[in-house]
């Protein structure tokens, strides 16, 4: 029996809400699997009345298996797989669809959001704070970031649902491709712009009102810091992270400040 | 800090800690947001914002990618903002940079601890899935709900513990270090800004220096320098 169309639509509101908690039961064994099945379950409810609920339970078992992708665009896979389950596609085809989507959705989300939109919005927030926006800079960061975040999750669910097994068409959407082209340069520009402005704000604009030569002293200190970091990074490679460097240098400085005579 | 304020900051720590992975990943866990709110709870949002900006520079490299172990800055940042605001309220506004240095050091240690706590939560989630294996194999939707709720509850407890660890023993350590700072306060400021900008510059380099985005990074740096000169 094939179930498609509006009969499943009432589940969308619940499924959409559950998308935001996809990673609640994240584990190394199944990664997003439990969250995917939990979010998809409202869309699968029409199957409860089919074959005594066997198809519904079989679908839940299948969808709770291992799945790994970026959490925001996993909604595309959830919509597509739910549609395929309701369309009565063969279980092997649905499993292949899930496996095939992991890599592309992970790469898409990581490039678009983690390496693009997140640093871009963070930098824009920092620039606004540096320009004197105060808490409004923080609010602007949250609003900017979450407009795209929420739209991506909701659009993904609907696009996946519309496409079903032909979900590759949703991934080839021209807006997504354009966004991938634009987001990297926007993030690079914003982060580059934020660094000097934050430095001057932290020394000058945050109520300290230092003379200009003191501000430039900090610029030199920051340049030395960045240079030292680059030199250390060249020697230590990826083992050097901002957190490790911060912890070590700040700890050394704290002890040095205590021993100062 | 009164018990009510402690509870308020812990509640903020829980919200931002759970946000990192579990719900809803709206980036309230970024230190820029968490430290600002932590400072605001104690009546000095701008002090929290200053700490948040510095920690955000450290956290630019923190991208919550899947199975990787990354620091959890949210609860420590909320606590750090509150600790600094509490210090200002107690009359420690003058020469605040040693206090900022010590508090950010404590927050960085706590963020590192937070990364490990996430790893433990993931393993606990895996163990819970093992306990529900039989119900999952039957396609029981109740098992999914219980696993999701259990994971959420574990993360709430983790975030609360991380916030309290930063606030109480972390706060004592930060006050101890700041009170014994003998060097000029300007040195603390230089160190904090040099490390923060250095870490941020390195993150920007790693993220954007390769390929066509390198040109945009250079253009942004030039625009930022010009903007700083014109604005301040």
Image: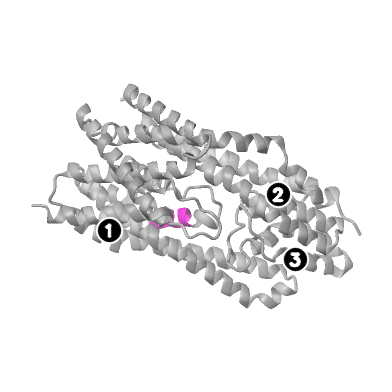
Residue drawn at the location 67% of the way across and 76% of the way down: B133
Determine whether B217 is above or below A50 in the image: above
Residue B117: give x, y in percent of width and height. 45, 65
Magenta region, main secondary structure = helix
Residue at the far right: name it. A1
The crowd level at tag 2 (other Cα within 10 Å; few <14, some 14-19, many 20+) is many
The chain ID associated with circle 1 is B
Comparing B126 with B42, the one in front is: B126
Circle 2 sits on which residue? Answer: A76
Determine whether A200 is above or below A239 in the image: above
Residue drawn at the location 44% of the way across and 61% of the way down: B115
The chain ID associated with circle 2 is A
Q: Nearer the viewer, mark 1 or mark 3?
A: 3
> What residue range appears in magenta?
B10-17
Residue A260: give x, y in percent of width and height. 11, 52
Q: Is residue B214 left or right of residue A74?
A: left
Determine whether B65 is above or below B119 in the image: above
Residue A44: give x, y in percent of width and height. 78, 59
Mark 3 secondary-structure assignment: helix
Q: Are marks 1 and 2 in contact (CB under 8 Å)?
A: no
Circle 1 sits on which residue? Answer: B171
Where residue A171 sits, quadrant-wise, is top right
């Amino acid at each position: 029996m094939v179930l498609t169309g509006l009969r499943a639509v009432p589940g969308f509101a619940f499924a959409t809400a559950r998308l935001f908690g996809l990673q609640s039961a994240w584990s190394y064994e199944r990664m997003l699997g439990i969250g995917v099945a939990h979010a998809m379950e409202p869309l699968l409810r029409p199957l409860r009345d089919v074959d005594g609920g066997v198809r519904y339970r079989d679908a839940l078992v299948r969808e709770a298996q291992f799945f790994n992708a970026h959490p925001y665009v996993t909604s595309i896979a959830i919509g597509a797989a739910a549609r395929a389950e309701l369309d009565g596609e063969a279980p092997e085809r649905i499993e292949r669809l899930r496996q095939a989507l992991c890599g592309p959705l992970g790469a898409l989300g990581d490039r678009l959001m983690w390496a693009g939109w997140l640093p871009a919005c963070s930098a824009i927030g920092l620039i606004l704070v540096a320009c004197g926006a105060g808490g409004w800079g923080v609010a602007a960061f949250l609003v900017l970031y979450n407009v795209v975040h929420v739209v991506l999750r909701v659009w993904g669910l609907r696009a996946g649902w519309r496409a079903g097994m032909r979900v590759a068409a949703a991934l080839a959407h021209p807006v997504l491709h354009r966004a991938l082209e634009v987001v990297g340069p926007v993030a690079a520009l914003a982060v580059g712009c934020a660094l000097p402005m934050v430095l001057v704000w932290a020394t000058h604009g945050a109520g300290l009102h230092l003379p200009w030569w003191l501000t430039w002293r900090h610029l030199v200190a920051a340049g030395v810091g960045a240079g030292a970091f680059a030199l250390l990074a060249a020697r230590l490679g990826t083992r050097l992270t901002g957190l490790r460097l911060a912890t070590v240098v700040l700890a050394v400085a704290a002890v040095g400040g205590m021993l100062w005579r | 800090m009164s018990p009510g304020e402690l509870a308020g900051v812990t509640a903020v720590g829980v919200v931002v800690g759970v946000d990192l992975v579990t719900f809803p990943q709206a980036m309230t866990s970024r230190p820029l947001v968490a430290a600002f709110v932590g400072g605001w709870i104690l009546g000095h949002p701008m002090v929290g914002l200053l700490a948040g900006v510095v920690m955000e520079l450290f956290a630019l490299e923190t991208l919550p990618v899947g199975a990787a172990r990354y620091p959890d800055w949210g609860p420590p940042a909320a606590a750090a903002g509150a600790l600094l605001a509490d210090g200002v309220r107690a009359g420690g506004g003058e020469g605040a940079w040693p206090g900022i240095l010590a508090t950010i050091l404590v927050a960085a240690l706590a963020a590192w601890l937070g990364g490990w706590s996430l790893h433990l939560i993931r393993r606990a989630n895996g163990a819970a899935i093992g306990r529900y294996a039989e119900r999952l194999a039957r396609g029981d939707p109740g098992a999914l709900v219980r696993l999701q709720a259990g994971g959420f509850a574990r993360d709430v407890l983790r975030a609360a513990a991380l916030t309290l660890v930063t606030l109480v023993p972390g706060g004592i350590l930060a006050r101890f270090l700041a009170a014994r700072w003998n060097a000029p306060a300007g040195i603390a400021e230089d160190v904090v800004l040099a490390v923060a900008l250095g870490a941020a510059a390195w993150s920007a380099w790693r993220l954007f220096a390769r390929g066509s985005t390198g040109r945009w990074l250079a253009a942004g740096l030039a625009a930022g320098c010009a903007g700083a000169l014109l604005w301040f």
